[in-house]
Image (spheres, grey):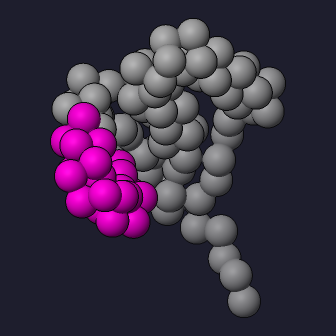
Amino acid sequence: MYENNGSYFDGSLIELVGLYIGGILITIFTLGICFPWAFTMIYRWETNHTVVNGYRLWFDGTAVQLFGMWIRWLLLTIVTVGIYGFWVGIKLKQWKVSHTHFA
């Protein structure tokens, strides 16, 4: 049987919708250059509103860090004629997890 153990998410739908709309608009208006900023903004909000076993999560990644990785992944995808693109999702997940901690 499932036991809660103090794990919950306390974010609101209005905040999430606002963040997604803002992130999409910023990404479109900057032609994708600010995607790392939008991504980190949304993921930071998600982690800051998540509690696991009574411990709140904390995200310390920055848009500048992700931008550097994003450029590297883009260049590797171009050089490998798209093949590296299959690994970008995994690399992004690894980057997110490496910057997520218990507060």
Residue 91 showing in the rendered view: no
Q: Is residue 50 visible?
A: yes
Q: Which residues are magenta?
A: 71-96
Horizontally, residue 51 falls left or right of residue 60, namely: right
Q: Position of residue 88 (x, y in %)?
A: 35, 56
For residue 45, side relative to residue 15 (left or right)? left
Please tell me which residue lies in front, 90 or 45: 90
- Near-viewer residue (96 or 49): 96
Residue nearest the observer in this picture, 43 or 5 = 43
Our reading of the magenta stretch's main secondary structure is helix
Q: Residue at x 55, y 40 (%)?
A: 46
Q: Is residue 5 magenta?
A: no
The residue depicted at 35 percent of the width and 38 percent of the height is 59
Measuring from the top left, give residue 92's x and y in whole percent. Answer: 36, 52
Quadrant of the rendered image containing residue 64: top left
| Residue 9 % position (x, y) | 65, 47
